């Protein structure tokens, strides 16, 4: 059946202790493991696999790779063949390349971002368990995010040079990985240029997104919260912790979701995202935002340009 | 890819005008069509296909059939073969058997309920459109439900006679229609009896559910609301309209979702259901509710038996 | 300036440890003091005086007295004179009659309930402090109620015998203690019988309420929560703790407020009450609920009689 | 008993039609009256007096006067005497100086702003009535604000010249009009300079506020909404209407309240303010924000300076 959802992100951080404090105390993840290289593995309370975030000590912030979980081991073989046939070279990393994780199919998206697919990760269970569970666990810290929800990758977009990695990634994900297109921003003559796209495999509004910019990079990784009310609590927590907030709480036009953008101590942008009544489906007509309403798509309430949205990323 | 989601329900109602007023004024659906036999077709504002509810004049309340949408016309043929091979006879109704709808694959679930699958229904669009849409349309009436979300079918359960149509339906949906089991209530010696199950195709907590009882019937059809806050508004609307409320606003243990149960004027039970932070996935471990906590599964706050839940249905 | 607000309630409980666990773990109060007689004193996080609840070990549940705080010590003298002139005898208890509390003016309401007024109680501060406070403290337990908000006293109402202690109390509070009437339920011929009243000194919808019944008693003491969302959390907490819920979450017609009624382990009824956009003012016209809509006044959503509301109290 | 609450604001607007559309369609007020001079009078749905907002055609935006309602006609005479004794000259405008309004006591605050007090205004009733009212009326437009809640007046603050009209106004309101101080921002050596104050007569967190700046003016008038959820709806409405948003939705540190700042078409700043669980009381200790946390007081989530907050006003 192929790709299920985003499985984890591997992020570079410059101060590992500050980063762990941020993801634990502000977002509410828990450390489930550390390896001898100093990498820290964390998960959200409502996730059942061992980790959804790897923090790697580095002298520069940014994304190492994003990983998506597929349903079955066989899917990896099927998808490897399809990806290779599409003209993208792949590498099957053996089981244990990452701890507690099965073999991983590694390749570069047309935009140059490293993506990995895997089918197996050690099961540790959510914090409420599987027998007569409470709706939420006691002792949650910070915002208490449910799960790693999606990432937004900045892709090189230079129509004059004929470069549009947003379009390239989108085509690849649709044709090879069976994502469906949910929303898009189109610009340029007659809206001919896909400047941003949101794609899904689940019925949440997006499992991955691409936005065009001057260079590739990570725009943000997003963690799921349930409601607008949960975003108030999250913002309160950020206020208490002096977290650097970029924008929000506010609502996106694209996906209708509610959002706070903020930064981890190394400058990697995070989002707490709350889906607000949206059922993504393969047969749902694609929603298109036009250039004149581009900023209403990004920030629905003000509809105004926020330069940092496109300029600041890792 | 098979089944996408619940597509429509066909309900029998005894006073068609009262029923239309209920679904329009209390729930916020709009009538999109009436046929010469007096059937009324309605849709929710956030749905794009022509209707999700058919009201049929009758002298008795109840369910005619439930219909699920599949992704492609070819899926109907593939599934027909699989269903027949499973030992259930099917009938392919020609296009136009229902207005604005393609051919439908009709069959009976092991429980005796009529289910239909279809791939094609006339597209009319959501009320916010597909270009630079607002997050919600002006002029919504009543509770303003987003979409028809799921149904719960009462199935005969008589362990002494060896009858468990909950288990039978569940097996059929898992093996033939590729639903995955999300939650279950088990009773009896060592929890050997599946007394209720919740299954999904989307990543919402359930697209269909079965509960065991003395006879087959319809427990409820559920419409989606986004939040606990929306349920307050819905309950206020019901208060204004003197809608007969059965239970709620409250929270289910099963699915964590928030709920109001109420009745249409003919006595068909409705639900407004708000998913509260739950990602159903094929690899999410099945959540099990045991007999001693059964009622916490149904109504988490009180955990107390509500006889009407299992006794009253159409 | 006279009466400010409800200051504390003194409750009889049959199992003091179970009671403390209830008020601490479910409601979120903290014990601030115990005395040598085994009485336990507690306060809510957003209160600044030393306690708002006294739990007294007893072999029977019920209310010892309710106490309201007045602005100044002189108010006690002025009010003593007015109360005596009204024909009600009073007693001025000396400072220290209750620990950390100044002198108290003690008297019986026309209904027979003991009321006390005081101007001085030891200041201990809210949990967020007075300098650059956070909006809420870390480490809150349970529902995290803000403050003791009001009480509802059951008063003897027997029109045939010419007894209406609801009316008597209301008149006394209006004429002597300068409360203003906010809402009322009237029954009987031409609505001539005040069956229930809600009165205020603050601009919240009520600081005290009276409901007619067969005998005097305590209907409930209510703790304030901010929102409908906070009530969901409170109900979830009650689900976790198997607290006996009487009704709710739902909305009152009277006051528009949202509510959960539930019982402490001794059977004293509690309420978590969330005011939903209501400004009580002396010049706001009194809202009247008529006999035919009485139950919509009590429980707006269903509008249906709930016998335990009037029959079960301590 | 003196001052009850804010009664109305009289605002100058440059395009009366655009202003009426703004206050009706975005905020949800209704026009209740127009006079021959082109002034438009509006009220909120939950107010019972004839108007709370007067829009006056002008070639410049700004505030004409703010008016507070007192409880009784006699209060006007008592307060006139006290104000005069304080050294501020007053004028008693005769009944009918403003339509549907009794005599008004007019004077200038130490800051130079015109304030009026009145006891009588024509009663028209809330939109839900006083007999068996619904919790909210059908057909609300826009944000559906409940009532005019408070105003914030910019006052000249120039410590070097010995000018502090924040302190002067505060002293006057406390000593003469019996407001109590709820919160304050103090700056300068040892926090000796009151840079901003929030004062109340009701038990809401503020009925008036003063902030120091280079010149006197109107910072904003605020309308009450019930909840954080209502602010999302309000912001959505502003997005639909392309209302110019200044800040928010966010939370103030001061008062804990949730807020959106935005501008009417003439540039007068509005606020939709939602009180979040705060009981102002004369004996509640004053909350103080220090200079280093000043911006956390203004905007709790970011704690960052927003120059327009102090620089842009009418």
Image (cartoon, coloured by chain):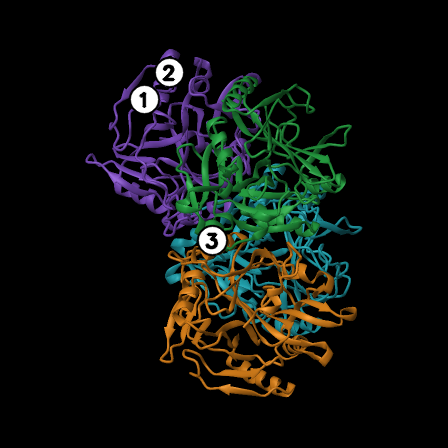
Chain colours: A cyan, B orange, C green, D purple
Q: Residues within 10 Å of mark 1 (few under 14, many from 20)?
A: many
Q: Are marks 2 and 3 in contact (CB under 8 Å)?
A: no
Secondary structure at numbered mark 1: strand
Residue D112 x/y as whole percent: 35, 20
Residue D105, disc = 1
Q: Are marks 2 and 1 in contact (CB under 8 Å)?
A: yes
Question: Which residue is at the far right?
Answer: A36
Q: Are marks 3 and 1 in contact (CB under 8 Å)?
A: no
Give the chain of mark 2: D
Depth check, mark 3 against mark 1: the one in front is 3
Residue A55 x/y as whole percent: 70, 50
| Residue beneath disc 2 | D83
* A104 in relation to D302, above or below: below
| Residue beneath disc 3 | B236
* A131 in relation to D248, above or below: below
Q: Is residue A15 visible?
A: no
Picture quadrant of residue A19: top right
The foreground one among A225 and D100 is: D100
Residue B216 x/y as whole percent: 60, 77
Depth check, mark 2 against mark 3: the one in front is 3
Secondary structure at numbered mark 2: helix
């Amino acid at each position: 059946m192929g790709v299920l959802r985003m499985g984890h992100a591997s992020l570079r951080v410059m101060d590992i202790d500050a980063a762990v404090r941020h993801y634990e105390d502000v977002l509410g993840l828990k450390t489930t493991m550390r390896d001898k290289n100093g990498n820290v593995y964390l998960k959200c309370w409502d996730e059942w696999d061992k980790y959804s975030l790897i923090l790697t000590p580095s002298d520069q912030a940014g994304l190492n790779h994003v990983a998506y979980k597929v349903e079955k081991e066989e899917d990896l073989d099927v998808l490897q063949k399809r990806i290779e046939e599409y003209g993208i070279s792949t590498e099957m990393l053996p089981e244990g390349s990452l701890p507690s994780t099965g073999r991983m199919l590694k390749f570069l998206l047309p935009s140059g971002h490293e993506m990995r697919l895997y089918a197996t990760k050690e099961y540790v269970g959510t914090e409420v368990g599987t027998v007569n569970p409470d709706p939420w666990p006691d002792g949650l810290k910070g915002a208490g995010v449910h799960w790693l929800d999606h990432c937004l990758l900045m892709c090189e977009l230079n129509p004059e040079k004929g470069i549009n990695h947003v379009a390239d990634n989108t085509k690849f994900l649709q044709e090879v990985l069976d994502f469906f297109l949910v929303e898009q921003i189109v610009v340029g003559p007659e809206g001919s240029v896909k400047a941003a796209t949101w794609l899904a495999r689940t019925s949440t509004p997006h499992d991955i997104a691409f936005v065009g910019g001057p260079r590739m990079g990570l725009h943000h990784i997003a963690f799921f919260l349930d409601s607008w009310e949960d975003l108030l609590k999250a913002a309160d927590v950020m206020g208490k912790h002096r977290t650097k907030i970029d924008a929000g709480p506010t609502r996106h036009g694209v996906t209708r979701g509610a959002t706070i953008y903020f930064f981890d101590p190394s400058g990697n942008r995070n989002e707490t995202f709350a889906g607000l009544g949206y059922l993504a489906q393969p047969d749902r007509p694609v929603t298109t935002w036009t250039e004149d309403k581009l900023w209403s798509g990004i920030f629905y309430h003000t509809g105004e340009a926020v330069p940092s949205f496109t300029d600041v990323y890792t």
